[in-house]
Amino acid sequence: MSIRPLCPELAKKAREELNEDAKTIESDLRSIKDWLSKQPHLRARTDDQWLVAFLRGCKYSLERTKEKLDLYYSMRSLAPELFRLKASDPLFNEIMDLGTYVTLLKTATPDSPRIIIIRAGSYDPAKYNFLDIFSAASIIQRILIYEDDATIISGFKTIMDMEGVTLAHWLQITPSSMKKMAVLSQDAGPVRMKGTHYINTPPGFENIFGIIKNVLNEKNRNRLYVHNKNYEELYKHIPQEILPNEYGGNGGNIKEISEYWKAKVQEYSSWLEDDLKYGSDESKRVENQGRLRYCLGSRVHSDNWNLINL
């Protein structure tokens, strides 16, 4: 069994909150690998460190872990637009240089959630598409799943900075793509969403906020916070000192953080290239079809939203 040892703080949280038991991890991994070997439609990673992330994300429920792995890899085939950008594409570095998706390097404590800032209005919608932004983010997220124990065990919080967002930005996000992104983030991935904090919200944001709430489950709807320009309220949830300099913190500037992640992705270039071969072939699916249709059908395949008020 090849799994990184956890720091004492994360090991304690994994035991108390995720039901982790060192005595059963090996047998749990064996069970998941055995199940994967019997799924002809799935092409999945089977290394211990990757699979234990999904076990932790499902609090060691084997059935939930199977469902999540199935949905995660099926999304690659059923929603390929969310994965369309490769780490080797020059566009990836361009997007990172925009500083639109910023994964902070510091956490408040060793067992605190990872913080991600999305600067939704920081790119030119005439030149870039939000699906490319999301695809670039998914590359970073894969590395976090594999490498960052704080993200897997403690989850993540998002700061959604809406400064500079225009109608042209909103029009790039269709109801269908919004639903697919929600399914991938909250249902398919093994990382727990611990809260989203909206700042610098534009006029008319209330209408968009209603749509966002509609695609989330109840737990995540209750973890949405709108601070607008009240940074002091934001700091009550996310310590100021770990934020980038641009947000009044001491966590380095956004350019430095982006350069770190560009180098990290380069370090993982072979791993990410290998990761492209994983996914699903839905024509070979022989079981659990009802579950998958429920997850995707009820949350993804409805384009009948009223767009007039967007």
Image: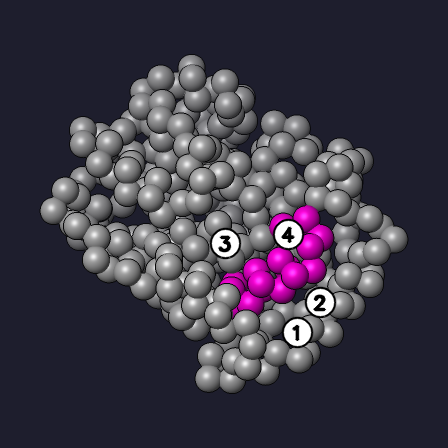
Asked if the residue at tag 3 contacts the one at tag 4, i.e. Cβ–Cβ closer than 8 Å, the answer is no
Q: Residue furthest right?
A: 23
Circle 1: element type: helix
Q: Hey, what amino acid is under mark 2? A: Ile
- C-alpha separation, residue under disc 4 versus residue under disc 1: 16 Å
Q: Coloring scheme of the render?
A: one colour
Rendered location of residue 212, percent (x, y): 32, 42
Residue 89: tell me if it is visible.
no
Crowd class of label 2 (few under 14; some 14 to 19; many from 20; radius 10 Å) = some
Residue carrying label 3: 187
Q: Hey, what amino acid is under mark 3? A: Asp
Q: Residue furthest front?
A: 290
Q: Earlier in the sequence, mark 4 or mark 1?
A: 1
Rendered location of residue 162, percent (x, y): 29, 34
Residue carrying label 2: 32
Residue carrying label 1: 36
Asked if the residue at tag 2 contacts the one at tag 4, i.e. Cβ–Cβ closer than 8 Å, the answer is no
Residue carrying label 4: 58
- C-alpha separation, residue under disc 1 versus residue under disc 2: 6 Å
Residue 237: tell me if it is visible.
yes
- C-alpha separation, residue under disc 3 versus residue under disc 1: 19 Å
Circle 4: element type: loop
Q: Residue furthest top?
A: 232
Tell me: 170 left or right of 279.
left
Circle 3: element type: helix
Q: Earlier in the sequence, mark 2 or mark 3?
A: 2
- In percent of the image, x 48 and y 70: which residue is there? 290
Give the magenta range.
56-73
